Image (tube, rainbow, N blue to C red):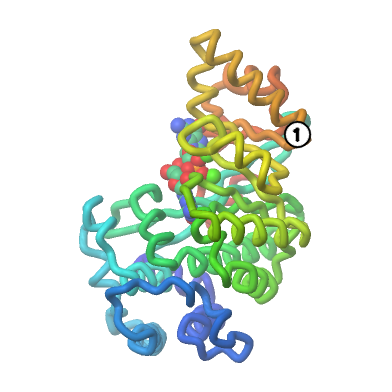
Amino acid sequence: MNRGQGRADRYGFRELELHFALISGQAGACPGPDRPDASVTGPEEGPRDALAERIAQLGQRLGAPELAPPGAEVVERNLQTDDLLALSRAELVGAIELGHIYPVFQPQISARHGGIVGLEVLARWSDKGCEHAPDKFVESMAGHGVETLLMDHFLCACARVQARFPRYHGRFSLNVNPRTAAAVDFIPVLLRASMSHGLDIARVVLELTEQTRLGCEGEARLLENLNALSNRGMVISQDDFGAGYASLQALGLLPFKQVKIDKTMLHRARHAERARRLLSLSMELARSLELQTVAEGVESDDDMALARSLGADLLQGFAISAPVPLERLGELAL
Ligand code: C2E
Ligand code: CA
Ligand code: CA
């Protein structure tokens, strides 16, 4: 069976129909300006109606499994990194809708009691039996304005986890590029998605990935959007703190409740006293701002002991579990 088709089945046809309706603007509860990513349309795709038509055709074809779904030949073609970066908006939408891009879940445990209190949702792209790492395509997603569509699918997957593991009361962490989080329609799309999938927004953590410069207007909208979501109970998290562009300034400005210390900090601290002090100070800084801390990249018992001794609240990494697909979550005894 085509792997994408299998995933489409797992998500359920009702949900797929809803996605098609949402992105084609046909859903009753989806008036024009609230459509996912309506504000950012790829320049090369032509009018929105053409895309809607392609997606509608995709939906019709999905109902007939003997036909190869359109898009499959486009996305399943042994993509190289350069191809991934050059994909068009329609191709990315096709890959999401067909389930070629799908979520895996990595547990986060409490440093205090060891129980699983969170699951980070990470994207994977399956292409002719080969898996592409997300950093090769998430940038294009944000650039083409299709990241909220991916988040909609991921929220749907989280709701399925919730239904399958009712005893799991932890959170679900979704990554988002600040450009996407600053979009005009980000809040309505996200709220509608969590409502339609029956997922309490207070169980969602939004991990803000790289801090790209957005310009004054974009930064103001990002602040406004994150404040609004935080007021509704969503946890806003600063990802990759201590690496790249995750800045101190952002920590002071945005309504973060959690900070994820970049894994390179922990890894350097294994061997270098200076790096260890930096890690320790970062934890202290987070604590003084009353932020929950997550140590990621925990790869060994030593890493775990170090992160705990420095006061990390949550631990995540290969020593605990690699990211796993939904069907293997049972192995984690959620
Ligand atoms: P991230 O958010 O910092 O995610 C953690 C990355 O570290 C993941 O890589 C995970 O598989 C990897 N990892 C987990 N435990 C360990 C460990 O013990 N040691 C080491 N060395 N690595 C570990 P992955 O899945 O390849 O994701 C890479 C990045 O791509 C993510 O980094 C995130 O920035 C981005 N990303 C992934 N999925 C999404 C998504 O759905 N949306 C967005 N916007 N970005 C995503
Ligand atoms: Ca992350
Ligand atoms: Ca990270």
Determine the residue positioned at 48% across, 74% down. 39
Task: Examine the rendering and report whether any part of residue 58 can be seen.
Answer: no
Q: Residue furthest top?
A: 273
Percent coordinates x, y for residue 167 in the rendering: 76, 54
Determine the residue positioned at 53% across, 79% down. 35
Percent coordinates x, y for residue 37 in the rendering: 49, 72
Determine the residue positioned at 58% across, 14% down. 276
| Residue tagged 1 | 289
Question: Badge 1, how many Cα within 10 Å: few under 14, some, many 20+?
Answer: some
Q: Is residue 288 left or right of residue 132?
A: right
- Ligand 2, image quadrant it occupies: top right
In this rendering, the answer to whether 91 lies above or below 313 is: below
Percent coordinates x, y for residue 105 in the rendering: 55, 50
Say which element carries label 1: loop
Determine the residue positioned at 56% across, 88% down. 27
Which residue occupies the foreground of this view, 10 or 303? 303
In this rendering, the answer to whether 33 lies above or below 73 is: below
Percent coordinates x, y for residue 269 in the rendering: 53, 16
User: How many numbered circles are shown?
Assistant: 1
Task: Examine the rendering and report whether any part of residue 102 can be seen.
Answer: yes
Which residue occupies the foreground of this view, 225 or 272? 225
In this rendering, the answer to whether 33 lies above or below 26 is: above
